[in-house]
Image (spheres, rainbow, N blue to C red):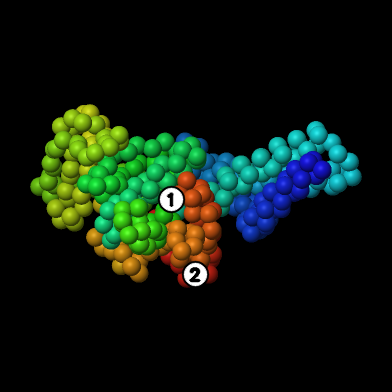
Amino acid sequence: MNEKRIERKEEENLKKLKNEFESLSLNEELEKIDSKIKELEVKTLKISDWGSEEAKNILANLERLKEEKERGLNIISLFKESEIILELLEKEEDESLRNELRENIKKLYENLEEYKKVYFLSGEYDDKNAILSLSSGAGGVDAMDWTHILFEMYLRWCDKKGFKTEIVDVSYGEEAGIKSATIIVKGKYAYGLLKGENGVHRLVRISPFDANKRRHTSFALVEVIPEIEDEELKIDEEDLRIDVFRASGHGGQYVNKTDSAVRIVHLPTGITVTCQNERSQLKNKETAMKILIAKLIELKKREKEKKLYELKGGFVSASWGYEVRSYVFHPYTLVKDHRTQFEVFNVEDVISGNIDDFIWSYLKYIKDEKDKGSYKEIN
């Protein structure tokens, strides 16, 4: 009986993966990949200088497409093999077959995760590191506590995904929580995966800071930009105000305690960047400048594309009417993305760092919108 229950669980997992696989229209994508491979192979026949940049780009793209094709064919093969194993297990119990099925499902999950990155993350900066900034909005001490909860949620998610994190700044609240924080998330596709977290996140709960146990609504702003460099971007020293100060704040496990913290203000735009994680003032200044450059490049790009939404938190109000996602603890439990309408009821699971379903639903949403021609992505 126990074996049958395990088998049914594996069957359900396989069915879930199959549904996800079919939603990606992999067969159609493989046809497109095949067509692109043939085009590039024709181009290789015309290469005269194999050391040229053009030749290197053609060969690199050809290799990448062949890897994508191989992964896609491998996924199809694993599904067929797994379905045959399930049929055999229906007729006769076999522990070795069951182990093989589990291994196949594990491989399918890993291959689909990699394939989804290629399928959804084709933006110019999607494969870059991410600079993730959080700031508390309307809601007082509850909003600062909420910002701290989100801060921990993203750190847990990064740890689960194998991304390295560098906490460059944390500004603590006087009573509890944090006013703002900046994290550099390091790893391939970090920005592409996290870009959908951009926006205002709303919390509804019974406030632990209210003696009368009333329900409170709090807001926090999340900003995600790619970590990029632009050698052509020149910053006039006269446009900068650089302050040096001592890192402070209770519970400062994320900051050092020397007079090496650096704050850089870009006077023309008002963009402010703070770094206080290193004991070296020079290193903190270098990191802060790197983040400032990335923010200026992003701002320049958004302005060029004539978008109403800009980089700075001051241009998006972390309050009612701007939220991209709501987390409700009372009077019911629900986490809902207001862009995609995707929702789950286990709030605790989400704030524990399990946000993949929200990430992929958003990436699918923007791809569908782009395919319909009704969405232009900034990234």
Work out which quarter of the rendered image holds the C terminus and state it.
bottom left
Badge 1 local density, few (<14 within 10 Å), some, or many (20+)? many
Q: CA distance from mark 2 to mark 1?
A: 23 Å
| Residue 356, numbered label | none
Which residue is identified by label 2? 373
- Viewer-nearest residue: 242 or 177: 177
Q: Is residue 263 above or below residue 331?
A: above
Residue drawn at point x = 31 percent, y = 56 percent:
211
Q: In the image as oriented, which residue stretches furthest toward the right?
A: 91
Q: Is residue 235 left or right of residue 55?
A: left
Which residue is identified by label 1? 194
Q: Is residue 333 above or below residue 44?
A: below
Q: Secondary structure at mark 1?
A: helix
From where the camera sits, is residue 58 visible?
yes
- Viewer-nearest residue: 246 or 270: 246
Residue drawn at point x = 62 percent, y = 47 percent:
112
- Viewer-nearest residue: 246 or 53: 246
Picture quadrant where residue 276 is located: top left
For the residues bearing labels 2 and 1, Cβ distance under 8 angstroms: no
Q: Secondary structure at mark 2?
A: loop
Q: Amino acid at mark 2?
A: Gly
Q: Is residue 132 above or below residue 251?
A: below
Residue drawn at point x = 53 percent, y = 62 percent:
342
Work out which quarter of the rendered image holds the N terminus and state it.
top right
Q: Amino acid at mark 1?
A: Leu
Chain-order first, disc 2 or disc 1:
1
- Residue 299 percent location from the top left of the image: 28, 56
- Residue 331 percent location from the top left of the image: 46, 64
- Residue 343 percent location from the top left of the image: 52, 61
Residue drawn at point x = 47 percent, y = 70 percent:
374
Image label count = 2
- Residue 358 percent location from the top left of the image: 50, 55
